């Protein structure tokens, strides 16, 4: 199928689906200038994930972990949502039966206007206590990397899921339920290598959903996808949503 044919087919499916789910990954924010993890230019090519994104890494050198997160928070604060985020947010408003699940921690979907986003891996702009888990809204200032919990004096850490940690139970639960009842599942800008998020498209497919992948590069999910669009999400998603609008807005 050519890309225009695939877009037409996707819109036909959108029009007859009662339940639509999308899972996004770092690729969706690449066009906002936020590096992915696993691409050749990605962050893990330059940094050691186990030192920077694990409990052991944090316990052995919390300052190093904090300066890496400060560096990323700065990039996120200076970034803007891109056309892919906006197209998904627009679809979110047009279709009540659409649910958005993200592995991203940058909050750009919400800044673009998406509501009720399920954040599987937490948020880089939120912090919590390492000991008592209490959420801390106050900003962590770069000159003062180590901050302590006002309730228990534990160290404050970013509220993200690190290697070896469990995903927030409510979020993964909700995501698995959505995946198993959805008619149409979009996997957008994810390498589909991080578990358990990577199982969601497979769950949906097993339960009978049509699986669509939007990614310029092939992933291990590609062979299971019914339709693949090999374009950046900032190009593919607006094409799909514009075509959808032509059909629903008269
Ligand atoms: P990943 O880095 O493993 O894979 C990124 C994928 O995006 C690749 O398959 C790549 O081909 C694709 N891609 C690159 N540019 C794209 C574009 N413009 N449009 C569509 N696809 C594009 O990312 P992942 O699968 O999300 O897993 C990484 C983990 O890292 C997640 O757990 C996530 O929490 C975290 N992470 C988050 C951010 C963020 O919040 N922006 C950034 C980096 C990593
Ligand atoms: Zn505490």
Image (cartoon, helix red, strand yellow):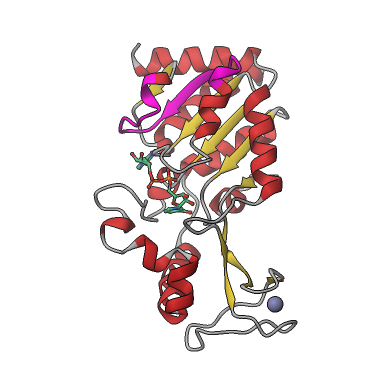
Q: Is residue 133 above or below residue 21?
A: below
In this orientation, does residue 84 appear? yes
Image coords of residue 158 (percent x, y)? 56, 68
Which of the image's four quarters has the C terminus? Answer: top right
Q: Is residue 64 above or below residue 192?
A: below
Instruction: Tell me, yes or no, whether the highlighted magenta stretch contains residue 32.
Output: no
In the image, is 230 to the left or to the right of 56? left
Which range is magenta? 205-223
In this orientation, does residue 115 appear? no
Question: Residue at the spot x=49%, y=12% of the render?
Answer: 9
Question: Residue at the spot x=41%, y=52% of the render?
Answer: 32
When asked about the image quadrant of residue 193, the answer is: top left
Question: Residue at the spot x=52%, y=33% of the render?
Answer: 199
Residue occupying the far bottom of the picture = 143
Observer-nearest of 207 and 106: 207
Which of the image's four quarters has the N terminus? Answer: top left
When asked about the image quadrant of residue 226, the answer is: top left
Image coords of residue 2 (percent x, y)? 33, 14
Image coords of residue 245 (percent x, y)? 59, 23
Q: Is residue 212 above or below residue 104?
A: above
Question: Residue at the spot x=53%, y=40% of the render?
Answer: 196
Image coords of residue 115 (percent x, y)? 69, 45
Observer-nearest of 127 and 115: 127
Instruction: Tell me, yes or no, whether the highlighted magenta stretch contains residue 221.
Output: yes
In the image, is 211 to the left or to the right of 15? left
Observer-nearest of 102 and 112: 102
When asked about the image quadrant of residue 33, the answer is: bottom left
């Amino acid at each position: 199928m050519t890309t225009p044919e695939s877009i037409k087919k996707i819109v036909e499916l959108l029009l007859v689906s009662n339940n639509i789910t999308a899972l996004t990954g770092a690729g969706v924010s690449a066009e906002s200038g936020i590096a992915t993890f696993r691409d050749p230019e990605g962050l893990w090519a330059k940094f050691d994930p186990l030192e920077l994104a694990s409990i052991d890494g944090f316990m052995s050198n919390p300052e190093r972990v904090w300066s890496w997160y400060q560096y990323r928070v700065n990039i996120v604060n200076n970034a803007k949502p891109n056309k892919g985020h906006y197209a998904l947010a627009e679809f979110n408003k047009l279709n009540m039966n659409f649910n958005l699940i993200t592995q991203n921690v940058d909050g750009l979907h919400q800044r673009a206007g998406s509501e009720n986003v399920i954040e599987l891996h937490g948020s880089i702009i939120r912090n919590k206590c390492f000991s008592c888990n209490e959420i801390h809204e106050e900003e962590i200032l770069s000159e003062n990397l180590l901050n302590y919990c006002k309730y228990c004096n534990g160290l404050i850490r970013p509220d993200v899921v690190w290697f070896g940690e469990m995903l927030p139970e409510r979020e993964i639960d909700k995501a698995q339920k959505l995946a198993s009842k959805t008619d149409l599942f979009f996997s957008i800008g994810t390498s589909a290598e991080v578990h358990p998020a990577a199982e969601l498209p497979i769950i949906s497919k097993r339960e009978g959903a049509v699986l669509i992948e939007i990614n310029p590069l092939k992933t291990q999910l590609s062979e299971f996808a019914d339709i693949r669009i090999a374009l950046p999400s900032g190009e593919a998603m607006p094409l799909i949503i514009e075509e959808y609008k032509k059909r629903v807005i008269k």
